[in-house]
Structure formats: C-alpha cells, structure tokens
Amino acid sequence: MKKYPSPANLLLYLGSGGYLFLLIITWLHQQPPLYDEPLFIPNVYLFEQYGLSREFLVNIDQQAPGPLYQFIHYPLRHITHLETPGIRLVNTVLLGLMILLLTAIITHINNTGKKQSFVLALNMMAIPMVWNVSGMALTEVPPMFFATLSVLFLLYALQKQEHSLVQSILLTLLAGAAAGLAILGRSPFLVLVPAAGALLLYHFRHPRRWMIVVIYAAVALAMCLPVFYIWKGLTPPQQAFTGAGGLSFEHGMLAFAYGALITLLIAPRWFYFNKKIPVYLLAAYVLFLVLNITLVRFEFGPLSVTMEKILPAPLMRLYPFVISPALAVIAVYFIICSLLRAWERRTEPFYLYLFGCAMLMLATSLKVTHLFSSRYVAQAAPFFVLLLLPFDRFSYGKCVRLVIGMVIGLLSLETYFLFQ
C-alpha cells in the first residue's frame, strides 16, 4: 500500500518549495523598477548625499514611509547596484530571515520542536499579500522583519525578568530599538507601543514588568519621535496628504475583511460557527446591500480585471456594489469572532499583546484616506502567524489552503509584471 507524506511533512515541502519558488522568480524578474519601486530609489541617493540629517528627512520625495528603506539599501548598494533583481531580492531574503525569527518565537511560546515550529512559521507563505511585498522592492518587508525581531527580543526579556535583571534590560533595549526601526520603516508600526500595554495585565504591581514595558516604549519612541518632529507629522512633508481627510471607514472595513481571508487560510477554527450563523450572515448581507445601494454607495471590486473577462458588462457594473456589502459582513463577523477569542485568552498578557499588534495594524487603514492596498494588511502578517497558533491544525485540508494562498499570492504578484 502506497504511503503518503504526513500533513506536517507535506506542509514543510509545500511551504519551503513556495519560498524557494518565490526566490527563483524574483531572481528571474529582470524588468526595470515598476509600480512604486522607482519612487524609493532616488531617496537612497539623497541619503548618500546628506546622510541622516534634517536635509535628507525633509527632502524625501514620493515616499510616505520613513527612511528605513534607505538604511537597508544604502549599505547594500555595492551588492545590488540599486538595480533589479538585486533590490527585489533584499525583501525576499528578509522574508526568509523573518520565517526563521518566527520559528524561534514559536519554539518558545508554543513549546514545540524546531521542525514543527518551522512548519508553523511557513504559514507566511500562505498569506497572498506577502508575495507582493516580498517579490518587489517595496517598503513593507524591512519594518515587518524588525517588528518580528522586536517581538523575539521582548519575549526573551520577559523570560529573563525574574532570573537576570541585566540581561532582561539589555534584551528590552534591543526590542525597543528593533521596534523603533520598524516604526521608521512604516509609521503604522507605532501600534507596537500601545499594544505592549497588554503585558501589564495581571502585573500591575510587578516593578520589573513595568520596567520592561516603559523601557521598550521609551526606546522605540526615542528613535522615531525626532523624525516625526522634523516632519511635523508621521510622513515626509511632501506626502502629508496620505493621512489627510479624517478617517476612512471603508478602508478599515476592507483591512479587516482581508484579515479574515488570512485567518481562513491559516486557521479557520478561529471563527465561531453553528447552524444559525449562516442565517445571521445572510440577513446582515441583505441589510448592508440595501444600505449600500441606497445610501453609502461604496464601490470596491477585487479581481476586477479577471471578473471583466467572465461577467457581461451590465453585471460588471453591479459587481462592486454587490461585493462590497459581502466584504463588510465578513469584516464584522471577523471582528466579533476576534473579540470573543481575545476574551477567551484574557489571562494571557503576551497573547493579548500579539492580538493588539495584529488588530491595531489592521485598524491603521482607517487613517489612510487616499487609497486602500492589500500591502497595508501584509504588515500584520507575522502577528497573525503567531496569533493563530492555538487554532492551527496540521491536516491535508491545511495543505490545500496553503496551496490556494500561494497560488493567489503568485498570481497577484505576477499581475504587476505581466500588465506593465
């Protein structure tokens, strides 16, 4: 009788193969910089000219994220020559290192062997948005890497707090510095600071826990606040419009809907489900559909290019109005399930810290009013991998979901290169 690989081994082969495939196609993508890639490279030369100075910071142009991109690519310029595919491979390699960092974190918090932890860390490859940001020379992956490094150092600092005060302080300083670099990469990573407040739950009278949280927050903020002061905001002066106009509830809704997709691919057990829930979801959809047609008039059509080839023109005009309420229902359902899961684990401060990081990162899309991009959701990916651990199960169904996520990610990435 033919013996099939176990789900764990199959996930290992598929996830590792997916990463290697991403590495290979990134190397093969020889096209000149495209999409947002050309916007960031001139600022590397600006950094070379002025260094880390006020002149550099206030003259950053066509780039809303902070200077971490330049910090990374400037020292690597003799290797990448600031050309493709070298500048793209920087992100792909950082993704691989991020997976190793996640492996170390999972080994500690999940109390599992390194092989199983590595398989769980490979969930990063199931998240479609990760393929876009890791296969192109964009700005999301470097801060994601440093945010993950920050979580690892913070976990070590908490473990050492009772046994070695000196080691705990040093690890906290490193965690804060890594968080500061993440914030300098993209300002939404500021959520790391308020999320750390969850670590004080059930430890209000514990001086060393207070010391860790205060040092962590102080170091992270000390690294980024001077830059924000020079900018008079969270973005370079020329890009201040990206946060203008108050809040966009539509963009926030889309971010949580995409978060639900990530959860469905990695650990659908996160969602509560019974016989009545489909009825509630259908009723909510009808309500949101009526509101959208009569009052809200919000249009969002994912995969529109593909759908235009399938649906006739009259239906295509209705498609954005019909799909938007469905995404709203998914977002609300996901938020309710998430709050209930957080309540279930309300006695676990570190878990609530990860929960805060993931959910607050999604919520930052509320403040991005000029457009919505799945890249913003990708920034929460490492937190989701850690957050969903208790609900993850190795199965052949999980293998299928991993493949689906990777295929969606690959197709999404390739659209940038095929339609330019």
Image (spheres, grey):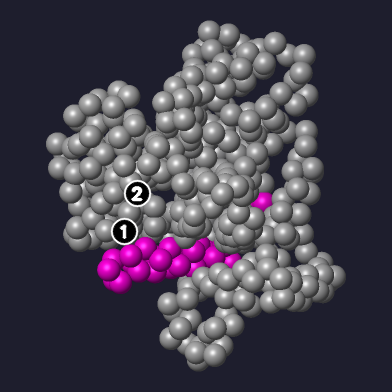
Query: Is 198 covered by the magenta stretch?
Result: no
* Residue 370 appears left or right of 28: right
Up the image or down, 395 lies above or below 282; here it is above
The residue under the point 75% across, 48% down is 339
Looking at the rendering, the stretch of residues picked out in magenta corresponds to 391-420
Q: Which mark is residue 262?
A: none
The residue under the point 69% across, 36% down is 352
Q: CA distance from mark 2 to mark 1?
A: 9 Å
Q: Position of residue 211 (x, y in %)?
A: 63, 13
Q: What residue is shown with label 1?
A: 35
Q: Can you name the residue that lies furthest to the right here? A: 276
Tell me which amino acid carries mark 1.
Tyr
The residue under the point 25% across, 25% down is 51
The residue under the point 45% across, 67% down is 408
**Res 365 seen here:** yes
Q: Which mark is residue 138?
A: 2
The image quadrant of residue 395 is bottom right
The image quadrant of residue 125 is bottom left
Whether residues under marks 2 and 1 lie with C-beta atoms below 8 angstroms apart, the answer is yes
Viewport quadrant of the C terminus = bottom left
**Res 381 seen here:** no
Q: Position of residue 78 (x, y in %)?
A: 14, 36
Tell me which amino acid carries mark 2.
Leu
